[in-house]
């Protein structure tokens, strides 16, 4: 009897050991399966994030390429005479809303402000091919479309001739669309425009004498600095050292106000102690941006006595006094680094003015007409990007002892405020003046 009980105990012990071992083995397999599922899920999520980031980077890069194509196409028109700014043929319209040709309606074109303008087509000297022209840049195949339209400027005070003329300026509009539907980043199209003014028209619509047909023409680059032109004396450039509130550049250099234009000059800001971006020249203006100056979108680009702006809404720069007469030959460019505040893309438009400034309150506007020369894009970049636009103005001589003053504002037609980076070795924004009496040789 004792032996049988002992045998029974051994049998039961072996049975329990087998059940225990079997239970532990099953639990380990479940754990491995759960861990594998978690690992695979994590890897898939990581791969998805990496793919999304890669796709986002590719989209951004392709959009930047598209913006560059637009810029080059606009610059190609800069050296054309005003009479050559005409399309060699009539663009066809299209029902495809993803095509720039959907903006064509017979002989009119809907600009980026949703306004219809008559197209400039034909003529003996017409030199602008409407396209589409296929180009390949950095692996991006794109179609370039060109449109030239007449702009009807509002009648301004003092107008004595052609005041009701609907053909005041010409608008050059460039649109770029991906030629390959697989190109991400601008599956619709990227569009930009600028205005050209007839250099032979005076400030009151009167025809002036044409300039010397064979001038010795050169250019000067006036770089935008962050140095206040204190009291508008002979100010020396100072390297920026830290963030600060927006400089108030609206006053006429009255010592009591402490408000002066910032300085601009022909020397590159090549200092070695450059602050790293982001640094800001508008720390008192809310908004997220990489650095530089932020300007609010409020003006109509037709400044008048009724439009009183603050330091957040318009900014100006001036040279020191010019040592001799300075002859402007009728063409200038603005080359600048910019982005939308908030790091998003959208409609953007800026306005510029150039003055002969002599501090006595009798300033002369060199850039003709109202509205002012402007540059608009339907896809203003969300990160700092180098843009430029060229426009014509009347030929003019700034007397020695006077200054050049450059004024910049952001149109209320923009989707957001716009920032500008300058006075930095990596972000050299400047105004280029074509002249027959260059300061820099």
Image (cartoon, helix red, strand yellow):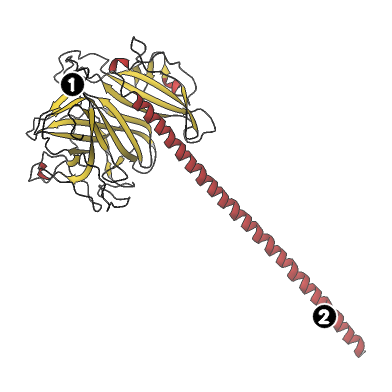
Query: Going by the picture, which residue comes out furthest to the bottom?
Result: 2
153 to the left or right of 38: left
Q: Quadrant of the C terminus?
A: top left
Quarter of the image holding residue 385?
top left
Do labels 1 and 2 touch, CB within 8 Å?
A: no
Residue highlighted by disc 2: 13
Quarter of the image holding residue 107?
top left
Tell me the distance, in whole angstroms, between the alpha carbons under discs 1 and 2.
108 Å
Residue highlighted by disc 1: 156
Q: How many callouts does the rendering have?
A: 2
Count neighbours of disc 1 (C-alpha within 10 A) and say few if under 14, some if 14 to 19, many if 20 or more: some
347 to the left or right of 265: right
Q: Nearer the viewer, residue 227 or 187?
A: 227
275 is higher (above) or lower (below) than 321: below
Quarter of the image holding residue 434?
top left
Residue depicted at x 46% and y 22%:
133
């Amino acid at each position: 009897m004792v032996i049988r009980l002992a045998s029974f105990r051994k049998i039961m012990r072996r049975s329990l050991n087998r059940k225990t071992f079997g239970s532990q083995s099953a639990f380990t397999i479940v754990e491995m399966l759960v861990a594998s599922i978690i690992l695979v899920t994590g890897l898939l999520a990581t791969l998805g994030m990496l793919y999304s980031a890669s796709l986002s980077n590719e989209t951004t890069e392709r959009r930047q390429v598209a913006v560059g194509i637009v810029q080059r196409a606009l610059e190609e028109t800069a050296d054309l005479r005003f009479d050559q700014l005409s399309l060699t043929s009539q663009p066809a319209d299209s029902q495809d809303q993803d095509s720039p040709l959907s903006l064509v309606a017979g002989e009119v074109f809907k600009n980026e402000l949703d306004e219809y303008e008559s197209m400039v087509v034909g003529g003996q000297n017409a030199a602008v091919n409407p396209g589409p022209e296929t180009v390949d840049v950095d692996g991006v195949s794109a179609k370039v479309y060109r449109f030239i339209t007449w702009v009807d400027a509002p009648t301004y005070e003092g107008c004595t001739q052609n005041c009701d003329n609907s053909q005041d300026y010409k608008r050059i509009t460039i649109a770029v669309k991906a030629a390959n539907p697989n190109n991400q980043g601008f599956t619709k199209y990227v569009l930009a425009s600028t205005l050209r003014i007839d250099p032979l028209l005076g400030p009151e619509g009167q025809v002036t004498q044409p300039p010397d047909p064979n001038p010795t023409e050169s250019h000067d680059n006036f770089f935008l600095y962050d140095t206040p032109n204190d009291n508008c004396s002979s100010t020396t450039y100072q390297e920026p050292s830290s963030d600060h509130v927006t400089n108030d550049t609206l006053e006429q250099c009255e010592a009591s106000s402490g408000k002066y234009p910032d300085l601009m000059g022909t020397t590159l800001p090549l200092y070695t102690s450059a602050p790293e971006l982001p640094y800001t020249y508008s720390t008192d203006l809310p908004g997220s941006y990489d650095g530089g100056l932020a300007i609010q979108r409020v003006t109509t680009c037709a400044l008048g006595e009724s439009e009183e702006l603050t330091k957040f809404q318009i900014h100006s720069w001036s040279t020191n006094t010019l040592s001799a007469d300075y002859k402007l030959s009728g063409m200038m460019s603005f080359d600048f680094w910019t982005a939308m505040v908030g790091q998003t893309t959208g409609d953007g438009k800026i306005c510029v003015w150039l003055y002969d400034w002599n501090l006595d309150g009798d300033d002369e506007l060199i850039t003709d007409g109202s509205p002012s020369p402007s540059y608009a894009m339907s896809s203003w970049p969300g990160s700092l990007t180098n843009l430029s636009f060229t426009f014509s103005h009347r030929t003019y001589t700034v007397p020695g002892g006077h200054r050049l003053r450059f004024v910049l504002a952001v149109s209320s037609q923009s989707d957001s405020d716009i920032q500008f980076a300058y006075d930095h070795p990596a972000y050299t924004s400047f105004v280029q003046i074509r002249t027959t009496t260059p300061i820099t040789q």
